[in-house]
Amino acid sequence: MKPKLLTAAAIVFIIALVFVFKSTVSGTPHVYKKSEIMMDTVITLTVVSNSQKKADEAIGAAFNNLRRFERNWSFFDAGSDVSAINKNAGVRPVKVSDDTFDLTKKAVEKAKWTGGAFNPAIGPAMVLWDFKNKKRPTDSQLKEVLQLLDYTQIVFNDNDSSIMLKDKGMLLDLGGIAKGYAADKTAELLKKAGMKAGIASIGGDISAWGTRPDGSPWRVGIRAPRGAPDDLAGVLSLKDLAVSTGGDYERFFIEDGIRYHHILNPATGYPARDFQSVTVVNPEGVVTDALDTGIFAMDREKALRFIKTNNLMAYLVFADGSTFTSENLRELLENR
Amino acid sequence: MRIAELIGCTTLCDRLLLVLLLVITGASIVFVPLYLPHGGQVRIEVRNKLLYKLPISEDKTIPVVGLTVEIKGGKVRVVDADCPGKICVKQGWIDSGAIICLPNRVVITVEGTPAPPKGVDATT
């Protein structure tokens, strides 16, 4: 082989190698997934990336941020912002982190929007129920706390980011909205880290952006309320949308044939009765999370009116097992 | 042609190219695994701390807090669990995705496998 020919062959080989290396490293995006148990639920973060290293770094940073949220919003952790607000109910305002201030403000906004059906002041009624040990409060115990479930008595001071519950005995409970808000913030963080597509799933509160690597929308299953945990009532095709489902199957016990579950009607303190599950789809997770609880707490007619008036995308499973799909969701929902 | 004669008739450019090729080959061996997903690993985490990272190709049965985890034939399952619902046991064998036991706070993940194209990516 002549030297010139050898040089030409080597150059061709290098060019080919560079192309192969480039297409291997950056041309084929992969799906990376990691789950952790946090905020009393399973959190799964899914991203599409060309590099495992970048995906791992972005997911790690997102989990660190979620740990911070957990510390701020836990109802039970004595050191959280929420515990500090509750401990000082009727005493003094409490300075909180920007995220807690923003989330609580949004929670009160959603309470006003739903006419109090979603209620972040539900705490005093919620603590009377023990779903794990199958214990329920008496009628008089519930009646006693009803006047404390007044979200209009949550007072904000924008100047120093402080929050105060005006009446002693009030308890702020962000459990009905925090996961959806966390899904939004996590999706934002992962997008900023260069993840062009993914899913932030905080329990059943999901924010999906971009598409799968093959360009198709993300597929999100809606759990069948009375089936096994992996039985699906339908599958949603989502792109740049959030979804949440509230169900009477999440935390519950059955006594004398009656199902007592964790979605309470703030007007009575008892579990809401008209639905098995409520699924809401919207660009914002903070909206879907608050509204799945809020709509669930309404009666059937009020819920349907609310969905129509606000042009919401919703899928409802009524207490008798019949279903309703809003017209604007039909294109995205494949029933099973 | 003997190797000494072959080297003798190469130019300086040929030799530089040869060195460059060797460098690229070496770099590929080091860097490509960093960028590509690591397939076939089973991660077992308890309370968000990594306890085991095991090859899925090696059959093994291991106790993990209240669970018994079995790896066999490129799949993983929870054989037995002390939690009330035993949802993790009912899930059966998996070769992608994750098995999660919330009461025991255990997450078992099969790494490096893409999302199933016809299945669902998440559940609400």
Image (cartoon, helix red, strand yellow):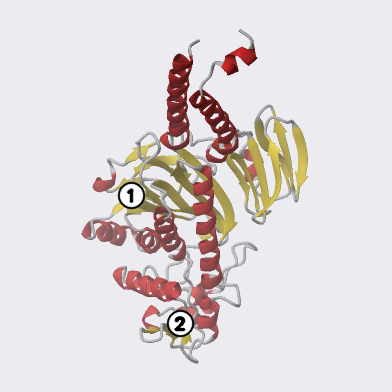
Residue A127 screen position, x and y as percent: 56, 73
**Residue B86 occupies which quadrant of the picture?**
top right
Tell me if residue B118 can be seen: no
Q: Are marks 2 and 1 in contact (CB under 8 Å)?
A: no
Q: Which residue is mark 1?
A: A240
Q: Nearer the viewer, residue B21 or A33?
A: B21
Give amino acid for label 1: Asp
Q: Residues within 10 Å of mark 2 (few under 14, many from 20)?
A: many
Which part of the image, by quadrant, shows the C terminus of chain A?
Answer: top left
Q: Nearer the viewer, residue A151 or A324?
A: A151
Q: Nearer the viewer, residue A104 or B109?
A: B109
Question: Considering only vertical position in the picture, is A78 above or below B30?
Answer: below
Which of marks 1 and 2 precedes in the sequence? 2
Q: Which element is circle 2 on?
A: loop
For disc 2, the chain is A
Mark 2 and mark 1: Cα distance apart in space? 38 Å
Q: Is residue A241 left or right of residue A176?
A: left
| View extreme (bottom): residue | A91
Residue A83 screen position, x and y as percent: 55, 78
Q: Which residue is mark 2?
A: A148
Q: Is residue A37 left or right of residue A291?
A: right
Q: How many labels were placed on the picture? A: 2
Give amino acid for label 2: Leu
Q: Which element is circle 1 on?
A: loop
Which marked residue is nearer to the observer: mark 2 or mark 1? 1
Residue occupying image coordinates x 30% and y 46%: A325
